Amino acid sequence: MAMTALVVVIVSVTVERSGPFIGALIAALPSAAGAAYIILAIEHPPAFIAAGAVGSAAATAAVSIFALAYTVLAQRRGLALSLGIALAIWFAGAAALRLVDWTPLTALALDAAVFGITIPLSWRYRTSGPPPKFLRTAFDIPLRAITAGIVVAIVTTASYSIGSFVSGVFAVFPIVMASSIVILHPRVGGKAAASMLAHSQIALIGLWLGFLVMHYLVAPVGVWWALAIGLAVCAAWSGMLWLVRVWARRPSSPSPTAP
């Protein structure tokens, strides 16, 4: 819970200072989900964790739709309406996931289909560079920390009654993104806050890839190695995106002049 709260703080501060792209890479990391899975792995058998990972992989599609909904709405609407509708869409998507008996392959197909739509639709809303400076209040950091900790506590406490799949679904509830939106939207504007979520679409691919890897590795290597490798896949994906961006922006070598 403390780790999740810390990452929530880091994300929004990074967006404030470094711009939406770097903030999106951090926001797309499984910080809350990782904290939840650490507790779940202590309290539940390996089969529970493997099944939960499938739920998390499938629910990442709902996170992508949430991000797109907020991104579009925030261009013209206020915080309450934009975030409220986006969260309602996430909950509707999470409820719809329970209607299907998901497997790793069907979760992969769902993510591929959803991201194939949300990434192109979000592309036009991406901006670069840091947003305008704003004055942070004394309540910003406690708000981020408390909300993140509450989500982790609810998921892990309710896991015995809601089962493995639903636990996996709610483990990827977009609390880091939502908390950052609450802080950023009123201060830098909806368009600047939405830019982070637009950038996060490609970064979120690493999230469902990591959970699918974790699902397949639980049996052969054990829960803890599977969790570590799955989280490493997520981090490696974000790191790769950062390196690609750095490489693309490097200054081109001057062409040699003819003698």
Image (tube, rainbow, N blue to C red):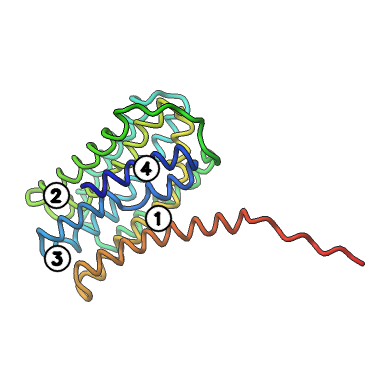
**What residue is shown at x 55% (from left), y 54% (from top)?**
245
Q: Secondary structure at mark 3?
A: helix
Q: Are marks 4 and 3 in contact (CB under 8 Å)?
A: no
Q: Earlier in the sequence, mark 4 or mark 2?
A: 4
Q: Earlier in the sequence, mark 4 or mark 3?
A: 3
Q: Earlier in the sequence, mark 1 or mark 2?
A: 2
Q: Residues within 10 Å of mark 4 (few under 14, many from 20)?
A: many
**Residue 172 to residue 225: above or below:** above
**Residue 247 to residue 11: above or below:** below
Residue placed under numbered mark 3 in the picture: 47
User: Whole-Å distance between the Cαs marked 3 and 2?
Assistant: 16 Å
Residue 226: percent from left, percent from top: 25, 68
Amino acid at circle 4: Ile
Return the mark for residue 156: 2
Residue placed under numbered mark 4 in the picture: 65
**What residue is shown at x 49% (from left), y 43% (from top)?**
18
User: Whole-Å distance between the Cαs marked 1 and 4?
Assistant: 13 Å
User: Whole-Å distance between the Cαs marked 4 and 2?
Assistant: 24 Å
Q: Residue 118: in sight, yes or no?
A: no
Q: Residues within 10 Å of mark 3 (few under 14, many from 20)?
A: some
